[in-house]
Image (tube, rainbow, N blue to C red):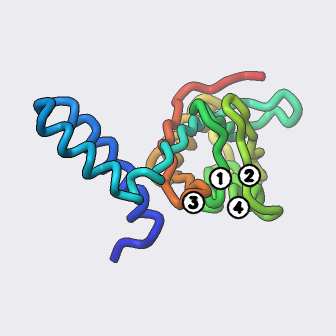
Amino acid sequence: MIDKVKRNTLKRIGLTTATVAAGTVGSHTFANASSYFANDRVLNDAQPLADIHVSTRVSSITNDLEVLIKNVGPDSTTITQMTPSVTLTKRGQFDFGQLLQDGDIVLSPGQSLSVPMKPHAVAVNAADSATGQARTLSDALRRSFSVITDNDAFAKVEVSDSVQFV
């Protein structure tokens, strides 16, 4: 069963596909199709998908990994949900749900927020390094991290492999 968020996301993807397909159709057919689209309230109300970039960095304050979530799209976006709410790694956890405890998060274009790692006791072996830890975290985020915005749509999420040092 498809929930409301997935349904709205599929509608927006369908709109994009229809727009691209309409560009390849003859002008007479396009004129008929555009009059049909103009009357479709769902397509007229569709908002663009949010564009989120996720990366890892080493914090200069805590000297440990943190996740950076940045709005790289041209419009402001309101984040209403992030899943999973907690991501576990060998050395600690990242609690994305804690960011939303006070309500939705509004990110302007270019604005970012960071999620610090909450360390837990672990036996670190000599082969582990900061870049290896970040790569494992990036893989975990790439496999399962998603963002839902105020228009009940999944945001486009890109996870970077690089580690920033600030």
Label 4 secondary element = helix
**Is 8 situated above or below 124?**
below
| Mark 4 to mark 2 CA distance (whole Å) | 11 Å
Residue denoted by label 1: 79
Position in image of residue 8 (x %, y %): 42, 60
**Residue under the image location 79 percent in, 64 percent down:** 101
Residue denoted by label 3: 83
Q: Residue furthest bottom?
A: 1
Lower sequence index among marks 3 and 4? 3
Q: Identify residue type, mark 2.
A: Ile
Quarter of the view holding residue 9 = bottom left
Q: Identify residue type, mark 3.
A: Thr
- Whether residue 154 can be seen here: yes
Quarter of the view holding residue 109 = top right
Direction from residue 3 to residue 63 in the image, left or right: right
Label 3 secondary element = strand
Lower sequence index among marks 4 and 2? 4
- Frontmost of labels 2 and 3 is 2
Labels 2 & 1 near each other (Cβ < 8 A) = yes
**Is 143 situated above or below 162?**
below
In what quadrant of the picture does the C terminus appear?
A: top right
Residue denoted by label 4: 97
Residue density around tag 1, few if under 14, some if 14–19, many if 20 or more, within 10 Å = many
Residue density around tag 2, few if under 14, some if 14–19, many if 20 or more, within 10 Å = some
Direction from residue 141 to residue 123 in the image, left or right: right
Q: Identify residue type, mark 4.
A: Gly
Residue denoted by label 2: 105
Position in image of residue 86 (x %, y %): 65, 60
Q: Residue furthest right?
A: 61
Quarter of the view holding residue 56 = top right
